Image (cartoon, coloured by chain):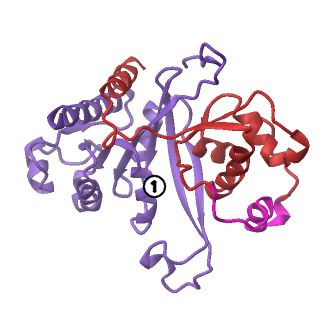
Chain colours: A purple, B red
Amino acid sequence: MVSVESERPGGELLVPTPVKIVIAGGFGTGKTTMVNSVSEIPPLHTEELLTEAGVGVDDVLGLESKETTTVALDFGRITISPEVVLYLFGTPGQNRFWFMWDELAFGAIGAVILVDTRRLDSSFPSIDFFERRGIPFIIAVNCFEGAHNYEVEEVRRALDVDAAIPLVLCDARDRESAKTVLVSLIQHTMDRLDAMA
Amino acid sequence: MAGREDWWYDEAAGPLVRPYAMVRGRTRPLRPELHLVTQVRAMPSPSDPDALSVEHMEIMELCRRPLSVAEVAAYLDVPLVVVKVLLSDLIQRGDVVIRDPARVPQVPDRNLLQAVLDGVRGI
């Protein structure tokens, strides 16, 4: 871990710039596994506590509006330098917590959408979400043992994603593989920036 | 980090009484701009330690090194909303400094992205 200097020259406290990447995808696609593979700390767990109606239509389905519900978040950390720290947030498994996705996506430099070829349809909501918000994303096909190995282009066609969106194969359990996925995403974000310039 | 035994409540307080009592019933963070990854760093010493609760002091202790709002919540094992309220108090008192996330689509910063790219390659 990179050591953190306590002060800038002149005595001002150094506070790093936080950068965020969202690891999205359907339930059981390996989001927490991927966070775990690259995080410098064991993934942390926190909860948002909700007590009010209006946080999502189906949140209060059959419940009194004052009922409390919690949304669990798992995340990891990579200290890039004393000035920059990267956080990796997995999206909550339950799709009904869409309001939480907005907070997760806020300021994110991009998203990795993990895909399990046995349940392609579970990744559609994630793709939709990041497409609509114009947030750079890539597709990472988590190659589960026992799953049929499809060609990248077959998966692309099935998901109906643009040719400009990188699509990579990975093993979320493997650190090097997970690193490669993150590198692809950051490069994609930079390419998009260059294209806009 | 101090253990959980330092907290004034116990399990019998229940999962809801606990966080709400801690923030005296306030559920709305006073500083809506506090995000999951907003960095928090404590000033070397609190302005008026006597005015701070045990929970505030816990945060001051944790944030001797910069941490995100989400990390503070995870380490203290309290919901995010509670940490945001407590942090709002500390910000208001000038006891912590914060830094918001870089917002790439709004403020394209290629140097920052390059630093992240190099950093990830290097782990």
Q: Is residue B24 above or below residue B88?
A: below
Q: Is residue A5 above or below residue A150?
A: above
Three-letter amino acid code at disc 1?
A: Glu
Residue stretch rendered in magenta on the structure: B11-30
Image point 35% across, 38% down: which residue?
A: A172
Percent position of residue A146, x then y: 26, 46
Neighbours of disc 1 within 10 Å: few (<14), some (14-19), many (20+): few
Quarter containing the N terminus of chain B:
top right
Q: Is residue B17 above or below residue A39?
A: below
Percent position of residue B47, x then y: 82, 36
Which residue reaches farthest right?
B50
Element type at mark 1: helix
Percent position of residue B50, x then y: 91, 43
Question: Residue A128 lies in what quarter of the image?
Answer: bottom left
- Between A29 and A181, the one nearer to me in the picture: A181
Answer yes or no: is residue A151 visible.
Answer: no
Q: Is residue A75 above or below residue B83?
A: above
Taking the magenta stretch, the answer to whether it contains residue B12 is yes
Q: How many marks on residues?
A: 1
Image point 64% across, 24% down: which residue?
A: A13
